[in-house]
Amino acid sequence: STLVVPFCIAYSQMATTFIVQGTVMKKALGYIDAASMNNADAIAVLFFGYVVGNVLYPELAKRDIKIPTSYKFAFGSALGAMAIGWALVVEYKIHRTFEATGERISVLWQAPAYMLIGCGEIFAVSAAYEVAFTAAPPSQKGLASAANLFFIGGLPNVLCIGLYHACQHWFENSQGRAHISTLEDYTEAHIAKYFWVLFGIALSGVVINVLPSIKNWLESVEDQAAELVKTPKPTPKIGKHLSKKKQELGGIGKGILLVNEKEPLMKTKKHQDYLKYGSGPVLYKHGSMRAGPTLAKKKQKTIKAKAWHFVEKLLTPRGTPKGTPRTSPKMATHNEAEEG
């Protein structure tokens, strides 16, 4: 996840520097302002997410082409650098238009920067979530996902705060004040220099992720995770049982043990007796439980006993002492026939 930090620094500008730049720009259509431009990022994520997931990746899979994860990070960082580059273009246009006519430009000029950031999320952030979950051991997937969230959202924001304080004098007007909400004060600041620093950081993410050593290291991590999934460890009880059997049988009994392990459980005498007579639940090799017919028979007996108790209660005359033995209908009929 640390490999996507340069892109996430560019991503964080949507809530900071892009808003500062948009406040001195003219509203589009009378109501679209700088805060509304975040919708361009959401639209781009929906559109490019569908195209990449349903068109690009399936076509590459048909041709047996797999994009390495580090290259996805690099491509996402490149899109982030392009977004910062477009913000630089907008910055210079703001200055030139103000110097020429004193007017403001439309806030829609920022739309390509937001859309480039949204497209970069599809490659960089989505791949980071995938690697953090799939490459982590089963017992540490929650920890890996939490660390991924920190490197995507927490750490980049902390670095942006430190970077802003280091470059704070670039956000001041000619009088040394940081209030640059008006177009006149904004043009006196040097925010373009800050954008150049961000552009260099985003480009560093591209350079780092295309290095062969980074690519090979990420592929080795993913291969190790895939092997763990293919060859899961046996449960402790099974492993302990097998080791004990091997010790008891010794070298000669190893072949017998292997033969017994290959035999299906359904063919054993014990299991056939269980199916025929029932002896309670049976623990299979894969750890599942199966209820035998014994439980069903017990349930039937319980239902019959309750029904018979209800019938006896109805046939017993009122006022009969509790200790008096009850006669079943069959016995009563037999006794009356003998008396007759």
Image (tube, grey):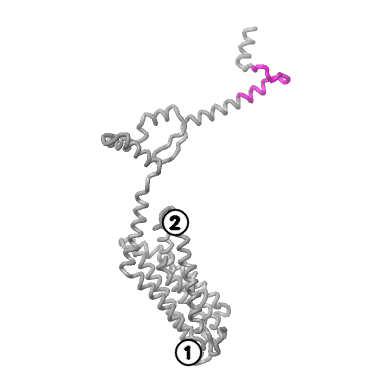
Nearer-N-terminus badge (1/2): 1
Q: Does the magenta stretch include residue 267?
A: no
Residue farthest toward the bottom in the current orientation of the protein: 100
Q: Which residue is drawn at 73% across and 20% down?
A: 319
* Residue on which disc 1 sits: 96
- Which residues fall within the magenta stretch? 308-326
Q: In the image, what residue type sits under mark 2?
A: Lys
Residue 34 at x, y percent in the picture: 54, 77
Residue receiving disc 2: 141
Q: Residues within 10 Å of mark 1 (few under 14, many from 20)?
A: some
Query: In what element is the residue under mark 2?
Result: helix
Question: Label for residue 113?
Answer: none
Depicted 292 relative to depicted 199: above or below: above
Instruction: State the residue at coordinates (41%, 57%).
Output: 136
Q: How far apart are marks 1 and 2 (CA)?
A: 52 Å
Camera-near label (1 vs 2) is 2
